[in-house]
């Protein structure tokens, strides 16, 4: 999230299999979509992880 926040990108897509740390932790094979959002006059990020019928949505912000 930190590396994308400094760009003008509104959305980024990743496959966790591309990251060595995900493979080491057994988290490979997930698709991740990061989207920039505005909430209560602050910039937030929504991350959507998915793999088959598994899904996880997280929301984060930089202080």
Image (cartoon, rainbow, N blue to C red):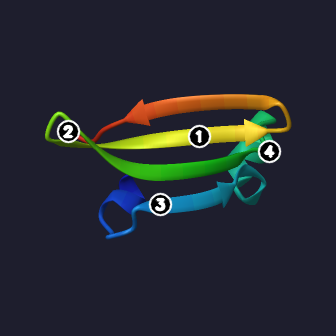
Label located before the other in sequence (1 or 3): 3
Say if 30 sits above or below 9 in the image. Answer: above
Left or right of residue 19, residue 46 in this image: left
| Label 2 to label 4: alpha-carbon separation | 29 Å
Q: CA distance from mark 4 to mark 3?
A: 21 Å
Asked whether the beta carbons under mark 1 and mark 3 sit within 8 Å of each other, the answer is: no
Q: Residue under label 3, please give it.
A: 11
* Separation of marks 1 and 2 at Cα, in angstroms: 21 Å
**CB contact under 8 Å: marks 1 and 2:** no
Q: Position of residue 10 (x, y in %)?
A: 40, 62
Q: Residue 3 location in percent, x, y? A: 40, 60
Q: Which mark is residue 63?
A: 2
| Residue that label 1 marks | 48
The residue closer to the viewer here, 51 or 2, is 51
Q: Which mark is residue 3?
A: none
Q: Is residue 9 above or below residue 63?
A: below
Which mark is first along the chain, 1 or 4? 4
Left of 48 or right of it: where is 22? right
Badge nearest the viewer, 1 or 2 = 1
Give the side of residue 61 with respect to residue 18, left or right.
left
Give x and y (percent) for residue 18.
74, 60
Give the distance between the C-alpha atoms of the residues marked 4 and 1, in whole angstroms: 15 Å
Disc 2 versus disc 3: nearer the observer: 3
Q: CA distance from mark 1 to mark 3?
A: 11 Å
Name the residue at 85% across, 37% down: 52
Work out whether 41 lies above or below 35.
Answer: above
Mark 2: give few (<14), some (14-19) or many (20+) Cα within 10 Å: few
Identify the element where label 3 is drawn: strand
**Residue furthest toward the left?**
41
Quarter the C terminus occupies: top left
Judging by the rendered image, the residue that carries numbered circle 4 is 28
Q: Is label 2 in a helix, a strand or a loop?
A: loop
């Amino acid at each position: 999230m930190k590396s994308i926040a400094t760009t003008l990108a509104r959305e980024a897509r990743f496959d966790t299999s591309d990251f060595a740390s995900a493979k080491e932790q057994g988290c490979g094979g997930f698709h991740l979509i990061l989207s920039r959002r505005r909430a209560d006059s602050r910039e937030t990020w929504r991350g959507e992880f998915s793999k088959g019928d598994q899904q996880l949505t997280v929301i984060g912000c930089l202080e």
